[in-house]
Amino acid sequence: MSAILNVKYFNSFWLKKIKSIVDAGDNLVEANVPGGYTNNTDRDWFIEESRIRGGYNNTSVDLGVKAYIVEKENKQQHRFNSIIYSGVFNSRTGVNNTNVFSVSEDITKSTDPANGSIQKLYAEDTNLIILQEDKVSRALIDKDAIYSAEGGAITTAGSQVVGQVIPYLGNYGISTDPESFAVFGYRKYFTDRKRNAVLRLSRDGLTEISSYGMRDFFRDELGSATLTDRIVGGWDIHNGNYVVSIHRSNYYSTLCFDENVKGWVSYFTYKPNYVLSLSSSMYSIVDRSIYKHYTYEGGSSLNGTFYGVRNKSYISFVFNNNPSLIKNFNTINYEGDTGWEVDSIDTISDTALPINKALEWSSSSSMSLDIMQNQLFTNNFKRKEDKYFANIVNNTSLEPGSIRMGDSSSGVKGFFAKVEMSVSEDIPGSHELFAVSTSYSESSY
């Protein structure tokens, strides 16, 4: 159906059709229908004029400049080994050119594509740390390097935003695990699953910290990790440790590295999605919830509680003095807080009974002769001169033809003994363990 529209003034340039009122329904706002619109087909068209208010010689508007560029190959490119930077941002002067990418300037910097894609960028002072899958490099920011005849580099100020890319020594990268990256001070930590290594980047370059007593462990864990397995890292500012968690399909391993002892000091029973530190506290994120570590939940004073689940804390170690000598391990003693128990003592051939925690009593509590006598004959630690002692009682099943020398036989025999100690679950607070030792005698074969 045709309609006649009267143009009142000059220079009308846009004829526009309003969406049908049938399609618009009751919500006229979503249909861009002006207020007061009635269902009249003649009014479904309107003309937008070039002059403001349609007045004679009023200010004229225009469509403006139309961007036009000719691309011979209008295809998307994925430059996995390149970085691009925009214009400057200055909050003091109000300049914000972060959405400006001028093609007339050299705004890209490429790394060696043979080292894989860029996984992580970290700005440190006037350097940009570039972590690729198979290489770690640094790029100069707002300066460049000029090399002398002797090979020495001299940094000079220039107009370049990203200067020369200088690789670090060592064929290491971050693989495809940028979540494993953590930084504290001038030290950076990350993993390289392709080379079964955990690395530290510091002033002395790259160091493989996984070789500090844990080479076999990380070789097995990282070497068998699939592409769907995640590796999460973070800095524990409370204890000053680097925490790394390897998430496998059916299990996980979370452990930490301590710079003070140059070694891996502990396993943990929690499985974080992310690890971070703020101020003097450590936090982890699990299932969109943030948890603060090293604090008690719900007024409880029981340690070892992560994400509302209590787990038993334990320590494992080996007695291995005179490794070429077959020994009879007779007793065990430790220095530390009360509450520690021995869960197991094993050698290649023998197994010992567990040892319970020491029973404490004060001078004000009543102690009968029967209770004291029971204390002497139960298999638990006895306190003497602020140290705790216990006998190692053999619990090995007899083999055919063996002879038991009475029920009071004690000690386990072997070249070495594996020991596992833990804290009783009903004792709140923290418990320190300073030293553990044993007394043994040479086996008579």
Image: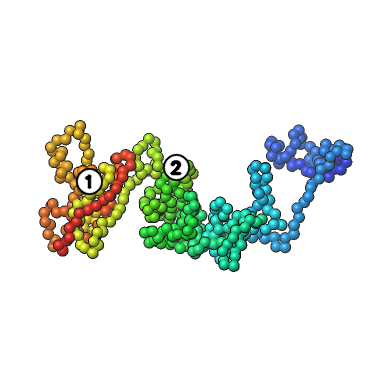
Kind of residue indicated by mark 2? Ser
Q: Is residue 1 visible?
A: no
Residue on which disc 2 sits: 281
Cα separation between marks 1 and 2: 35 Å
Question: Image quadrant for the C terminus?
Answer: bottom left
Q: Nearer the viewer, residue 56 or 313?
A: 313
Quadrant of the frame with the N terminus: top right
Residue 313: x %, y % from top left: 33, 47
Q: How many marks?
A: 2
Residue 429: quadrant of the picture: top left
Which SS class for mark 2? strand
**Crowd rating for badge 1 (residues with CA inside 10 Å; few <14, some 14–19, many 20+):** many
Determine which quarter of the picture holds residue 115. bottom right
Label annotation for residue 211: none
Task: Confirm or deny contact between disc 1 and disc 2 (CB under 8 A).
Answer: no
In-front residue for pair 67/84 = 84
Residue 183: x and y in percent read 49, 51
In percent of width and height, residue 209 lies at 42, 58
For this orientation, the residue located farthest to the bottom is 149
Image mark for residue 388: 1
Left or right of 154: which side holds 395?
Answer: left
Give the residue drawn at x 13%, y 38%.
Answer: 370
Q: x and y percent of residue 109 in the render?
A: 62, 59
Asked whether residue 410 is in view, the answer is yes
Q: Residues within 10 Å of mark 2 (few under 14, many from 20)?
A: some
Q: Name the residue at the top extreme.
A: 364
Callout 1, which amino acid?
Answer: Tyr
The residue nearer to you, when weighing 17 against 287, is: 287
Tell whether 5 sits left or right of 18.
Answer: right
**Left or right side of 411 for 229:** right
